[in-house]
Amino acid sequence: MIIASVCIDNPSKEIDRLFDYSVPDSLKESIKIGMRVIVPFGASNKLIQGVVLEINEKSEEEIKYKEIYDIIDEEFILPQDLIKLAYFMKKKYVCTLSEAIYSILPPKMGISECFEAKIVIEDCSICSKKEKQFLSMLNKDNYVKIDLKSINIKRADLISMRNRGIIDLKIETKQNLSKKTVQLVRLKDNKMALELLNNKRLKQQKKIIEYFLNNNINEILLSQLIDILGCSRVTIKSLEEKGVIEIFEREVYREVATEYANYPKHILSHIQRKAFESILNEYREGRRVSLIRGVTGCGKTEIYLNLVEHFINLNYGAIVLVPEISLTPQTVERFKGRFKDKVAILHSRLSDGERYDEWRRISRGEAKIVVGARSAVFAPVENLKLIIIDEEHEYSYKSEQNPKYLTREVAEQRVNLIDGLLVLGSATPSIESYYNVSRGIYNLIEIDERVSGSTLPDVHIVDMRQELITGNRSIFSRELYSSIEENLKNNKQTILFLNRRGYSTFVSCRECGYVCKCSNCDVAMTYHISTNTLECHYCGQTMHIPKLCPKCKSKYIKHFGAGTEKIEQEVKRLFPSARVIRMDMDTTRKKGEHERLYRLFKEHKADILIGTQMISKGMDFKNVTLVGVVAADTMLNLPDFRAAEKTFQLLVQVAGRAGRGYDKGKVVIQTYEPEHYSIQLAATQNYNEFYKKEIEIRRFLNNPPFTDLTYFLFTSINEEELIRICKGIEQEVKRVIPSDFTILGPTPNFISKIKNTFRWNMMIKGCIVDYIDIIDKIIYDKTRATSVKYSIDLNPYSLI
């Protein structure tokens, strides 16, 4: 007897194990480890998806196993290295095996059940009123399709009636995603076609035959044939019935990216060539991870392209990761321009069908290079050998959903499994990555010069406190205003950066201090001028600005602070002739908007680009000579030990957008804390000095990378129960962890309520790897059968 151990598509901790199923004779030749299958599960034997992770042969036993129902597809098989990666993620990130496996598989690859039923016995005396009503829809002779959504009957009711012999039930499954096909036409019988040409009555049919013969066409799209000849489907069908032509279907891929212009290969500079060779030499010596710390504009992408080409020529595959979807068009433009159809694209803005097709192209070996965001690290690339993570410091590489993986760690584990190479690149590497360099774990390549002879921009720090003293209450300092004005006169482009969308940060009463907050969340609502409403960026609730203060009835209620919307309005007021583009979450919701706005600005169809952090990195516009940072210290005072690091990284990255062409660039940084070391060192792009200062602070406070910081988030709609459970967990955890560990909390979260759900958190400092499973069990036991839910995040990138 062949037994397949299956990981069920269910994230529940209660069933976090493999389930054994016998393999029916009809599937014995086909079944393989890594295959997606359909299996009956639970008391009602509901058909659900699973992945085969083990296959064993057992002697006949008294145990009666359920049988695998079917194979979903024989084509897509999860490779062994990805299965091992799932087990690594389960242990490392304290998640279930199902969560790990199904984060690796592309989303929405689920199945649904289709039901057909007919009556077996007509005696309804044993049926309930609801069942009798349902049976009136059926008959005894033919099966009737059942739509559970439109009738008052559940799946369990159907199973019950089948088990009691009242109905005969057929259950079939179908994938939620299907292959895209097109209809084509080809000439089938030339001899018969020539005979029909002599028939004077069949004018339309003769027209079709003549088109094939005169143009020497083998096949053509059915829709195209109809458009060209203006003939009807009936005429074409007639020829098919006569055996003259054949109509057939062919699978096609959904179009993901338009064709890109050829991107020629550039000769590497001496510094780029040295970096390229260092990476490969160190790899041959057994060093699997290299970090490129290169100033903005130093030509890291060209090094990436050459590395990919090197491995492709050796018949290996490669994955290239970018942190933001907004960077994908530019990266795709270069890789598609160089490697054409060998490139597949994976990111969250693709439709489910597009992502399904790209995964199949990759798994079939048709695409050897994958360009994408975080989850593309799991792409089933054939013969994978190279992974590149551009802007490796970005916190978007940290998953906020279970499993809460860090892409760099997952990529490092994957290259270890395949004896591959991982290349990290950034002008501002994460403190953790640079610390690994200092310990000799990573190979370091440093590039401190820009390509093409361009120099780093001049950076000016403006103290906005002095602007207020001198009477300037505008969003823009006098220096930034005059710089924009001069740039417009010189026909140069400007980028204005503010990491806050909307029109204003909050709406408040100047009389009593009341702030308009979301009724579902413990956050101030943001004013959006385009809709003239207040909006909660956490739950989406909207409301109109009250005319009077709800608290003191004062009419002095006004919006304060600024977002990208307000910057846009102010720019249009001050510079009415300027062509302005805004790029933030609000303007890029629609599919393709990132790419459209990127191209508009690249083609100089706009003078000023205003945006949030999605414009702060990777963008390479040769005509941008001015970057203005409207508020540099928005993140500095957040309760997060990485606040200074994030500020430094963001400022260096956004400043790096200026002066990438032949003209000198200028950056104006507006701040209320000009003396802060992260702002001062960002102005000079002095990463090494920043690292020295930051690493000593981390060492003194015993923060990562010197220890683990494990973050526990507890949520509940019942605040009293939440507080009681949290305090009980703290007492239990104290008993099992070493005395040198530090417990912080439990306390209310920085945002203490979202969507009417209360939030508390607790943090533990200490090397937790040997204790995390024990702590997880304590929390699981304490929260079981309560309203409290929890999540665990090892070394989180955000503590809010």
Image (cartoon, rainbow, N blue to C red):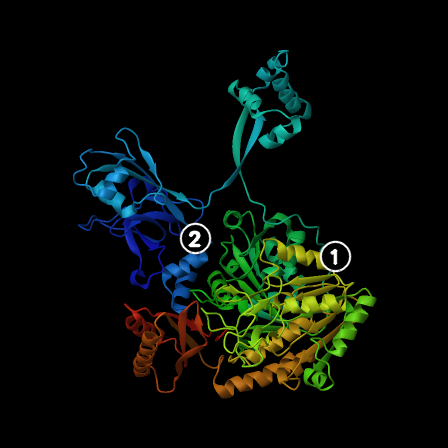
Calculate the distance from the C-alpha at mark 1 to the C-alpha at mark 2. 42 Å
Give left or right: position of 151 versus 334. left
Give left or right: position of 642 versus 266. left
Say which quarter of the image contains residue 289: bottom right
The mark that comes first in sequence, 1 or 2, is 2
The percent coordinates of residue 340 (x first, y second) are 64, 49
Residue matched to label 2: 78
Closer-to-camera residue (224/748): 748
Badge 1: residue crowd in 10 Å (few <14, some 14–19, many ≥20): few
Count numbered badges in the picture: 2
Say which quarter of the image contains residue 272: bottom right
Camera sees residue 87: yes
Which amino acid type is shown beneath numbered disc 2?
Leu
Residue matched to label 1: 603
The percent coordinates of residue 500 (x first, y second) are 60, 70
Secondary structure under tag 2 reads: loop
Camera sees residue 428: no
Task: Decide: is 279 above or below 136.
Answer: below
The percent coordinates of residue 367 (x first, y second) are 56, 50
Q: Which residue: 20% across, 33% down?
A: 122
Give left or right: position of 424 versus 744. right
Which amino acid type is shown beneath numbered disc 1?
Glu
The percent coordinates of residue 586 (x first, y second) are 59, 61
Secondary structure under tag 1 reads: loop
Q: Are marks 1 and 2 in contact (CB under 8 Å)?
A: no
Q: Nearer the viewer, mark 1 or mark 2?
A: 1
